Amino acid sequence: MMKIVNLDHISASPLLAEVKDSMIEAVRQDYHNPSSQHQAGEQAAEALQRARTSVAQLVNAALPKEIVFTSGGTESVNHAVKGVALANAARGNHIITSNIEHNAVNRSLRRLQSAGFKVTSLSVDSTGRVDPADVADAITDQTILVSIMHSNNETGTLQPIEEIAKITRGKKVIFHSDAVDSVGIMPVDVQKLGVDLLSFGSNTFYGPAGVGGLYVRRGTRVFPLLDGGVQENNKRAGAENLIGIIGMGTAAEIAVQGMDARVAHLRRLKDKLLAELPDYIDEYIINTHPRYSLPNLVSLSIKYIEGESVLLMLDDEGFLVSTRSACATGSLRASHVLLSLGLSHADAQGTLVLSFGIDNTAQDVTAFLTALKNVVTTLRDISPLYKKATAQN
Amino acid sequence: MMKIVNLDHISASPLLAEVKDSMIEAVRQDYHNPSSQHQAGEQAAEALQRARTSVAQLVNAALPKEIVFTSGGTESVNHAVKGVALANAARGNHIITSNIEHNAVNRSLRRLQSAGFKVTSLSVDSTGRVDPADVADAITDQTILVSIMHSNNETGTLQPIEEIAKITRGKKVIFHSDAVDSVGIMPVDVQKLGVDLLSFGSNTFYGPAGVGGLYVRRGTRVFPLLDGGVQENNKRAGAENLIGIIGMGTAAEIAVQGMDARVAHLRRLKDKLLAELPDYIDEYIINTHPRYSLPNLVSLSIKYIEGESVLLMLDDEGFLVSTRSACATGSLRASHVLLSLGLSHADAQGTLVLSFGIDNTAQDVTAFLTALKNVVTTLRDISPLYKKATAQN
């Protein structure tokens, strides 16, 4: 079988061996319902609490009960954005966000707009960053929520969250940050950042997909998204996905222990890719911020060709890459994130999102660059855009 | 170690051996993201589709794509109730339900009431059933949704869903049924029932907790509860809990194959319990309908004692029982379901919910009855209520 090299960790990361072991153990254990009053229920409740404590440590929450387990980053974001808006509607109806948020934020806000909320969406500069001063300017006496992502899922660019939090705290506005692609990849400390809510997902740090967390600072007014029972300290109803949560807890523990080594490893791979790329292809744009960006992600727009063709040809060679968020598959429009950076439609179409994981090696980078060179050469040979451009030179 | 006898399947059922195997295999498989465009993504998408087909068969949906995978019965109910209300708000603002629904329905409706929707909650008769004629009478030209549960989670009593569906269809009102405690326990056929939406959970049929499904008849107007990506045919955003979904798919396949034997086994245990109960204790009320009820559930109110004391003493003997829905733990109020049946507060406090599973045996029933007799005798010996009542006789 061909070796598969996953350079699409933003879509899916492999489970850590320890996560697999803990989930298999949990499957075999047949836990009862953590809400049941008998001893079997208590054992399940203890396993749930252990996982909560591990996840709280990963984001440095002051209290384990500030962590709400969810079915993933998307639910966390929906819970935060809709829950804060509806719980604070008596105070105001204005929400501030940015032009480059994930669709989980965008579409949650669109839903709120049709219910009468007003949304200000801030532009980013050509490097993809929000200016904190713009947040300050946009706040009115009606503003109840600011939602700005921690890192962008298509470019990896980091936002000035700490600076924005200082502003929102001063104005007593609730601040949520979508950190789905950051938590577990780099240190994220909710107390240092000063956010009130933070969304994250387990698979980013090699836990199972379909499990996530929402940090809710104690005292923050937010309604549940799932109404019903009193689980999760009355913040999220429904029987827990305990097997997945246990896997997430294990993944969180290991992420805490290995964070420094993990960041260093990812950064080495990314630096190698960026340093050697000019030796393999020309005429491309790097959309990722040179300094403020995730250690594992590179967004690369290759001129004169289609990212989707590159993806499919690389797939045949065993390299998994992405052209954009996996959540956006099926949508044909060019990425709103790349257009917001000022990229042309043509350049946006030629974009690859490369995201490394701890399972990648330096050899993977070299093998990828070699394969990429072949694919780009083949595609440009048949590209009318490329012929036209080279004829002009 | 003491043998544990689970008579609290309504709170948690053990995983089938085949479910464990398929989940462990899925953990080891390290599936990629089903939305990714490369071959690794396609393999994940195929596994997802297989599970969807199995689950569609379990409820006899006409098409697999009428099944939306969720994080459990509570999410399914929230999605159905809130999603239908918001998507059809232009047509009307009136919703009909019953007095004995699960809190997932009740609290979702309360949330909608604060957004301006009007709710009519129908009474049940002393056997716990809704009269379909009451549904017909309650429908106005503003009615957009009827939500009546398939079986009650505390009493096991079944509602006349088919008759209600005939009425809602005639009036072009959308009909949702919460079948979380029915699907997998007894045959549930969405086409025969005539419902437009049906909520269910995987653990009821020995799949993992924290995974569920929502049947949405093709053409039914419903908004997503989780906005974001285009997963689940654009009905539910977010990366899938594929490991859990694969377990649910396996559980569904086996439920379809073994349904007749399963129902017969559960009914034998329930009949044995009801037939022999008078030989062990006296002065109790059976809250479960003698004919229209789940094959696996008995609600038993034992006079002059507290259900919670019975639960804890039985727990010490290795018998897991419930006093009410596990979701309601932490709430001190008497069950709204039992009060709706006309039970006194005192009798409601003495209630045990016993729910059998395919892992129970006839010997379990006999052992339980023996233990129950001892516990009831002990508790009545120290009960002032019991002394007073027996002194009067």
Image (spheres, coloured by chain):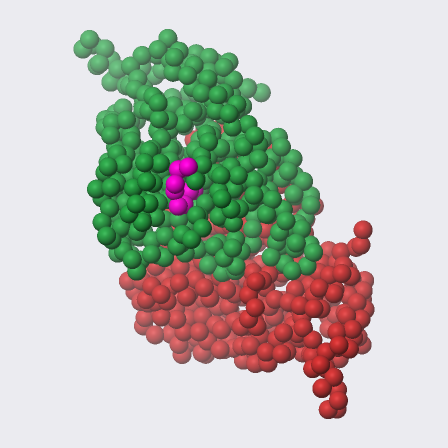
Chain colours: A green, B red
Judge left or right: residue A241 versus residue A163: right
Q: Is residue A119 left or right of residue A373?
A: left
Q: Is residue B197 left or right of residue A290?
A: right
Residue B379 seen anywhere in this rendered image of the structure: yes
Residue B186 shown left or right of residue B5 in the figure = left
Q: Position of residue B264 (x, y in %)?
A: 71, 63
> Relative to A308, is A361 above or below?
above
Residue drawn at x 30%, y 26% as measured from the top left: A349
Residue A210, magenta (yes or no): no
Please report the residue visible at 65 percent of the width from the left and 43 percent of the height from the top.
A26
Counting from the top left corner in percent of width and height, residue B278 is at 77, 77
Res A102 → quadrant: top left
Quadrant in which residue A86 is drawn: bottom left
Q: Nearer the viewer, residue A114 or B303?
A: B303
Which residue of the protein is positioned furthest toward the left in this rendering? Answer: A392
- Residue A365 lies, in percent from the top left, at 46, 16
Is residue A49 depicted above or below A288 in this figure? below
Report the span colored magenta. Answer: A192-199
Q: Is residue B362 above or below residue A236?
A: below
Taking depth in this image into account, of B163 and B32 the one nearest to the observer is B32
Residue B175 in view, yes or no = no
Residue occupying the point 53% across, 39% down? A57
In this picture, is B205 found above or below A158? Answer: below
Image position, residue A107 (x, y; %): 33, 46
**x 45%, y 70%: residue:** B97
- Report the residue that reaches farthest toward the front: A170
Name the residue nearer the viewer: A342 or B177: A342
Is the C terminus of chain B in the top left, top right, bottom left or bottom right quadrant? bottom right
Seen from the viewer's position, the closer of residues A304 and A271 is A271
